Image (cartoon, coloured by chain):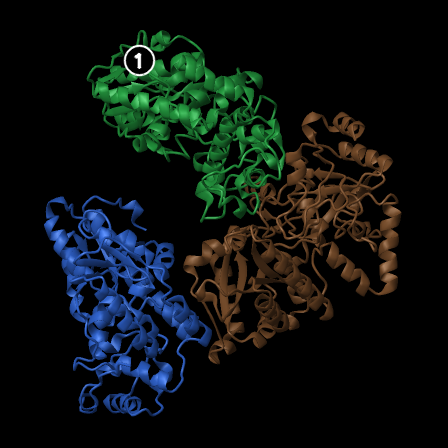
Chain colours: A brown, B green, C blue
Amino acid sequence: MSDIRKALVDIVGERGVSDAPEELWFYSRDPGVLAPHKPDFVVAPKTAEEVQKIVQLANREKIPIVPMGNGMSLAGLVIPLKGGIVLDMKRMNKILEVNPMARYVVVEGGTSQGALKAYLQKNHPTLRHSIPDAPSTTTIAANVSLHGQGRLTNQYGFNSDMVTGLEVVLPTGEICRIGSPSIGPYWISKGPTLPDLSGLFLGWLGCTGVITKVGLKLYPNKKIRDAELFVTDRLDLIPHILYKLTHLEMLEDINVWFQPKPLMFLGNYHITIFFTGDTEEEVEFKRKMVWDCLQEYMDSKDGGFMSIQYMKPMLLEMPGRNIADFADVPKGGGFEYSGPIAPIEHFPQYAAKVVELAAKYNVLYASTARLISGGHSMMYSISFAFNRNDPAMMDRVEKALDEATAFALGMGGIPWKPNFKEQKMLLEKMEPNARRLLLMIKKNLDPQGIMNPGNWEVNA
Amino acid sequence: MTYIRHIEHENIVHRCFRCGYCKFPSDYSDFNCPSYKAFGWDTYSPGGRMWLTRAWLSGEIETSARFAEIMFSCVACDNCKDQCVFPRFKDFLPDIFQETRAELVGEGRIPPGVRDYFKAVAVSGNPYKLPQSERGDWAKGTGLKPYTNQKYLFYAGCVGSYDEVGKRMAKSVGKILVDAGLSVGILGGEEGCDGNDVRALGEMGLFAQLAQTNIEKFKAKGVKEIITLDPHALNTFKKDYPGLGGRFQVRHFTEVLAELIRKKKIKLKAYPVKITYHDPCYLGRHQSIYQAPREILKAIPKAEFVEMHRSGPDSFCCGGGGGNFFTDILGTAEDSASRVRVREAVQTGASILAVACPNCAKMLSDAVKMEHLEERLEVLGIAEILERARK
Amino acid sequence: MVQLKFDQKVCASCRSADCLLKCQYMTFSGHKEAHGEMMKVMKGKDSRVLTECVTCYACEEYCTRGNHPFYLISEKREEKGMFTAPRPITTQWKNMTQMQGKYLVGNVKDTALSCCYLPELGQLGTGEIFKDVASAGVFGAEFMCPAVHSHFARMSVIKERLPVVIENYRKLGVKEVICMHDECYGTLTSMASAYGMEVPFKPVYYLDFVWQRMQELKDKIKPLGITVAYQRSCSNRLIPDKLPVVKKIFKLIGVKAPKRKYQDENALCCAEILRSVSGYKLADDVQKRNIDDMLASGAEYCVFNCPACQTSLSEKVAKRGLKPVHIIDLCKMAIGEKEREAAS
């Protein structure tokens, strides 16, 4: 191994390699419930060429490589299940180009969501990207490689749908441009009108290469954002309410959430409705449209709008800093969620399942669902908090999550950012020819099986 | 495991989610944790320290030079405490790191630079290993008299007393206080180290000794009100000394100068220059004094005041906090805090970077040289700027 | 459980029917219709009043014969299983104000400073005006007047909780409770008496206390010389005898409150509860008329007496150029404790 260490130091320098017990311990785990596994090295490249050399070395030596942003998937996707090298990509964080007229940005993969937000705010205040509710440390490349979602997902789809081009280091070491940047200087399309090769990398959880650059669509950043919060105690009405809201075709984001604590939230389902405008008139118009479209539920007394003046700063914050707070409810620093993507008509069944699982496994729940692409589907987060000092509770949460995924698959949903166990369940359920195709692509792209091994594998 | 380790807040360490908000300022524009910025490993971030402390307390990792470096590279700037999203324990993050350092001191496993620092302070009474008799030399020519029974004691601290940049700063403050007619004296050769950084680095025994000696001396001399040059001294005098029986009225010199300007005891003439200001962590985040220095700078006729992108509660540390000024664990590489900070200062277009702390003054002056910015940026104490603008 | 003491004879023999004829949100052709509707309510029959009342509390003031029309309407609505606001909103208010043992009690001796369940009141009850009582603050659901549930026609919640609140104060051993919120004072006086509940301490209206203190601090007062519009709160309708003290305070601190259309008995509600009960159209209309009227009177400041009104209207009045300020902060401005710019 010392030869490998030396080779890595030759590539990235002393400050870019560590095999010290401290880094090996830390980079062997993520904040979720899955068991840690130690890497042999943690390496922090600064350029695509360095990544390329590391991958070439790994290929020669058959060393696993796990690309990592900030490790916030909570699903153990950066735990080096088979050891090897964890690539901490956060030093590749340059914002390379903004094309304001074509509304896109090109960043290095390790750029954080927070840094991009701040950069746009300062330099291009009329533009924004789809900010996920994950902490601002999470990186752009990690987010698209797990089909992340953000504030604009209801309007424009998964954050990975917003990619306008990629630069990837293939598992065999070639640096490869995907989409329009493979043809010319503009990062305007990840695929169309070409065969869409971005699908070889987006959603692959780092199993098919290391994303070193991402082109990302930017969207109008209107001057005013506002929110309304509709509550109902009738679970059965929620799909209909969501259908009406999405019919308006003018909302920024729609989240449905329920939680037993604090007490004021008990017994109700909450729908946070975000909208934007450049003028007061535009915002008021949208607000009225929102109220009017739900009037029938107010008339029947089944639902109504909460007075939320005091909550607004918290609701409108991007990312929502209070979301991490759930981790401290059992005073223990952790939560994890299963996030199946499913049709909105299934909300009542999923909601009932969350409560059922929490009771069965004696764990605390919270649930926030987000609409995707104007209601074509939604992401249900079935979220359980745990105390990191209580292994039994962590075990219960893991079991509850496994059961949630099994339930989702049974309902025809697909797990979002599946952990290695969920991937296995998916592959088992997948139509055989589709599975064969997926594995064939993986095998061909990564003949040595070095990229994030243990993921998207049949015999993991 | 050789040691059974305990720290006061060990019941909290497992509650960190390592979400990483602690690394940033409130607008996320850049990493605001100096050690994370310099080293680039998650282990060197506040969340990393929390998780490693937990592993270390439980025996999953052992004490090592690396672990000590990780703990001692924390500059105690308090950014993490402000940015952490967990209201129920965020205030204790700096305490946890300080307690871990104290435990390492107890084990005797500390970086050589830290050991040398403790030794110098213990033996010579200052980190520079210079004679105590020279401690008051900086005051020559200021008109400051030894403290007898004046209203105020002006406390210069180690950096203000021995470092060239610090001395310049102390001198300028001293001169203005005298010229404004304040009843003020200094302890000179009798002044002792305030111990703030000794405490931050975890040598609690030495700190207690220094603090007790100072408190007794202040009391014996009849000191009631203290003006400090150094925000580090201000911090420990206000935060730690009262618990040890040392209750004094303590103010930072910028608060006093702002008041003197308000009362027209300092008269200013036009000084057309563009100035930006760097908040010292022990003045800003630790003591919430943000306005006084700005009030002074804005009072200078014709001077243009501009903020750096990160300022006030979001200010980026110079890298010299928590004893790193002396131990230099952060180093001087391109991403070291002081170099990042002067690059940020230059971006404002200011030609003067105003400072209110002798540690910052020295750190940032050196960084200006390393970045070859001498032609574009001058690092000056606030009182030094006033010297140029005084009638 | 305690019962509402409503004198049916008084109501039956009423010749004015002011309770409904003066209502700003319902219109009646005359005495006959209004009186007839109230009789229906009283007898437990269906009445348009039960569906149309927006819960502004004003009829409690309009009735000068000592009866409690609003409490009656709320009682009857609940008896019929009716909801004013949507059911989930009603539940939410009930849950949100549930006693959970999370209260704060300061250094209370003979006097307690009641901050209800509104954190803003704790911040207001400070400084020179409150210097002798600021440390005696009590806060939390355990000390909250439950009157708000009358907006939702859930008098049962009030009847269940108010005796507990009174008992909680009693257990503190206080002789008097300074109520920082009109609603608390109104509950402990008007409502407790309407339900025959004994209050074993003296409720003190905070503006009486402030008036007293401001007279003591007279030397420190620098007349503000400003023009304001006063936003009367719904709960002030429970204690109309306390309206004049506002004017006395204004005069003392040099504040002009020119006559306007919607003041005193004609005051308009802050309308946030109306938004829940009747939807945005009425709420927007009421708020617009109210703010138009404030501006027409020449006011520079909009002065609040209730933190809930302040939360509802602050942003809206500020957008139209009025500075929102609580009456206590106005007093603090007058004695130089608070800067004018910081009023909002």
User: Which residue occupies the foreground of this view, A436 or C33?
Assistant: A436
Q: Residue at x 31, y 21 (%)?
A: B214
Q: Can you see residue A251?
A: no
Q: Looking at the picture, does residue C63 appear above or below residue B327? A: below
Name which quarter of the figure residue C219 lies in: top left
Q: Can you see residue B139?
A: yes
Instruction: Identify the residue under disc 1.
Output: B190
Q: For this view, does A73 lie left or right of residue B155?
A: right
User: Which residue occupies the foreground of this view, B241 or C52?
Assistant: B241
Q: Quadrant of the N terminus of chain B?
A: top right
Q: Looking at the picture, does residue C239 appear above or below residue C305? A: below
Q: Looking at the picture, does residue C84 appear above or below residue A259? A: below
- The percent position of residue C175, horizontal first and vertical second, equals 15, 62
User: Which residue occupies the foreground of this view, C236 or C259?
Assistant: C236
Q: Residue at x 31, y 13 (%)?
A: B190
Q: Residue at x 19, y 17 (%)?
A: B149
User: Which residue occupies the foreground of this view, B322 or A349?
Assistant: B322
Q: For this view, does B131 lie left or right of residue A155?
A: left
- The percent position of residue C108, horizontal first and vertical second, equals 21, 56
Q: Chain of mark 1?
A: B
Name which quarter of the figure residue B68 lies in: top right
Q: Looking at the picture, does residue B260 appear above or below residue C97? A: above
Q: Residue furthest front?
A: B2
Disc 1 marks which amino acid?
A: Glu
Q: Residue at x 57, y 53 (%)?
A: A390
Name which quarter of the figure residue B391 lies in: top left
- The percent position of residue B289, horizontal first and vertical second, equals 36, 33
Q: Residues within 10 Å of mark 1 (few under 14, many from 20)?
A: some
- The percent position of residue C232, horizontal first and vertical second, equals 25, 65
Callout 1 secondary element: helix
Q: For this view, does C113 lie left or right of residue A23?
A: left
